[in-house]
Image (cartoon, helix red, strand yellow):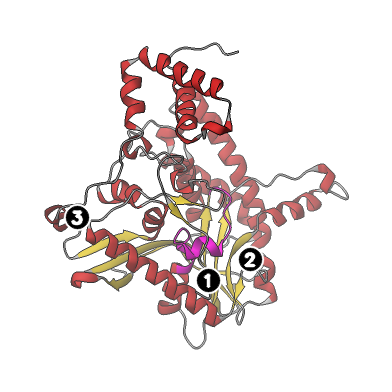
Amino acid sequence: DQIGSYYGLLEDLGNLSRELMTIEENDMNQQNLTFWKIMYRILLKKKKEYQELFTSLSEEITPTKISEQVLQILYNKEVNASVSSIENFYNCEYKYFLANSLNLQQIDTMTLDSKIQGNYFHKVFQILLANGFPVVEMFEQKMNEAIQSATIEFQRYFEYNQFNQYLKQQFDKILYSIGEILRQQSKVAIKIEATEFGFGRDNIPGLILELFQNKKLKIRGFIDRIDLINQTIGAVDYKSGKKTFDLSLALDGLQLQLLTYMDYLKSSYTNQTKQLWGAAYLSLLEPVVKLNDLSYFTQEAVLQKQSQQLLYNGIYIEETISSEIKSLYNGTAKNTFTNKEVEKLIENNRELFVNAGNELISGDIKINPAIDSKKVSIGCQYCRFKSICRYEPNIHCGRQIGNQKLND
């Protein structure tokens, strides 16, 4: 039984519509199938706008090819793109076109979403680590100063309503938890070469790749931290959610960042005395310790368990990864590759950039969200353009991923 309104019925109608489009008659008895088809028509008759909406679901959603005139305006001599925007492209080409070529934006609702949270966390650590890891004795004071300084920049969000003020308190709890663990890690001989380092902007050259029609693709990026350990260098990318390096996603274009950062550091930072160790994500999540997981309850034991949760996860080079790097950055056999394999991955990464650039300048943009092996439209997750493209997983075809291999 369900009590609701006609507007609340919309989601149920959507589910019923998809079922009726995909179900085989022999999957249910004819009487039940006929009943639901009649019920569906009766429910739709009550609202004309519903009829128009659900009729449109079965219509063709293939976009029209972009005209040459528009292409000249959008991509005249070159395509300028960030690394994350090309990841958007491989999530769904149409999503990239709307968000990054047409720059469609949502109205700012002052909601503290994951983007604002991520920007706030990034700002705090940018300030905290601007001059390297603070000395252990000064770490707490420097952390307080960083949070206070970053709060001023995001104050209009935090003071918008009481719920945002509550979220701000939760954000700061996470920051202090992560800060305490970083304080312990600051005892390791890590030298921070740079924070918030941007390439492809501010007169710092980025990656420039050749496309068809004598055009160029210019890739820009933003490395949150460049770490130097024992004359080996690598990149760290902060993530406000849980993130791990996935080789399959990297080969399909959905994880381009770490390999691009390695590509840039390899060509711009390394030399005979300084080699590349790799690149890693650092998930900025509050570590939760269960009492059952503790052999004994002390502050040191809790911190040790928290440190194990706040591990870096990335891609590492076998020839240069030391035991110290392996321990700190969570290097395992699964995410450690030889120099030759890394070269292959970087080459594949560049090919993915070039392919995306050529597709864009061709004007043949497709609605093709990435579909994983479980038939989940991961390209549609968190997409704000669903009402524009009208893609339905049970009706339309996406781009199957997960079939690429490193040896291909």
**Gap in angstroms between the C-alphas marked 2 and 3:** 41 Å
Q: Are marks 3 and 1 in contact (CB under 8 Å)?
A: no
**Residue pictured at 55% horizontal, 48% vertical:** 241
Q: Is residue 171 left or right of residue 355?
A: right
Residue located beneath label 1 in the image: 234
**Gap in angstroms between the C-alphas marked 3 and 1:** 35 Å
Q: Which residues are magenta?
A: 240-259
Residue 337, x across and y down, in percent: 59, 75
Residue 374, x across and y down, in percent: 57, 49
For disc 3, the neighbor class at 10 Å (few under 14, some 14 to 19, many from 20) is: some
Q: Earlier in the sequence, mark 1 or mark 2?
A: 1
Residue located beneath label 3 in the image: 74
Q: Nearer the viewer, residue 173 or 262?
A: 262
**Gap in angstroms between the C-alphas marked 1 and 2:** 10 Å
Amino acid, disc 1: Gly
Amino acid, disc 2: Tyr
Residue located beneath label 2 in the image: 329
